[in-house]
Image: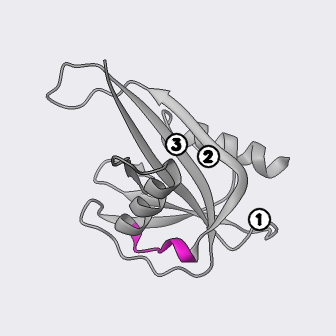
């Protein structure tokens, strides 16, 4: 079975102590996604997440405050169009904070949206909703 790994960020504005938060989602034609992508040889998970964040949003690593103690991991088996092979995909997401970011969208996405933090969210059942549930549990610790 082919195995792939993607790393990325869930990015929030401001900081954890602010009562009003929002998080960034990237827009595809038929769904939302996180800024994330496949790891390259020799990269750590966090290096991959920072590279993908910068490539997809223009947000540099220097603008991100990584939330200590949060790392979301999920393993699932996506079916890609035109492929019969089962793939095992590991997804690793870090939580980061930014102040007033300027977003520059890559050609991979149609746009982006800042979503108000008002859990529980029902955005995408396979990856985003479970991630947001873990973020909520982390915030409540």
Mark 3 residue crowding within 10 angstroms, few (<14) / some (14–19) / many (20+) = many
The label nearer to you, 3 versus 1, is 3
Tell me which numbered mark, 1 or 2, is placed earlier along the sequence: 1
Closest to the observer: 97 or 27?
97
Whether residue 120 can be seen here: no
Instruction: State the separation of the CA atoms marked 3 and 2.
Output: 20 Å
Q: Are marks 3 and 1 in contact (CB under 8 Å)?
A: no
Q: Residue 47: percent from the left, percent from the top?
A: 47, 57
Q: Secondary structure at mark 3?
A: strand
Closest to the observer: 11 or 44?
44
Q: Quadrant of residue 85?
A: top left
Q: Residue 38: percent from the left, percent from the top?
A: 35, 46
List the residue tagged with mark 2: 121
Q: Quadrant of residue 18?
A: bottom right
Q: Residue 91: percent from the left, percent from the top?
A: 47, 38
In the rendered structure, which segment of residues is drawn in magenta? Answer: 57-62
For image coordinates 29% across by 63% down, the residue present is 110
The label nearer to you, 3 versus 2, is 3
List the residue tagged with mark 1: 16
List the residue tagged with mark 3: 92
Q: Secondary structure at mark 2?
A: loop
- Among all residues in the image, which is located at the extreme front? 42
């Amino acid at each position: 079975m082919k195995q792939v790994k993607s790393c990325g960020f869930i990015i929030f504005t401001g900081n954890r102590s602010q009562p009003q938060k929002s998080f960034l989602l990237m827009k595809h034609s038929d769904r939302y996604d996180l800024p994330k992508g496949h790891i390259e040889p020799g990269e750590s998970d966090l290096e991959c997440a920072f590279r993908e964040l910068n490539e997809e949003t223009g947000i540099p690593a220097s603008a991100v405050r990584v939330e200590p103690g949060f790392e979301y991991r999920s393993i699932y088996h996506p079916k890609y169009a035109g492929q019969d092979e089962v793939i095992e995909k590991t997804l690793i997401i870090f939580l980061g904070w930014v102040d007033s970011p300027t977003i520059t969208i890559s050609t991979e996405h149609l746009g982006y949206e800042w979503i108000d933090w008002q859990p529980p969210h029902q955005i995408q059942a396979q990856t985003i909703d479970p991630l947001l549930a873990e973020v909520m549990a982390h915030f409540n610790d």
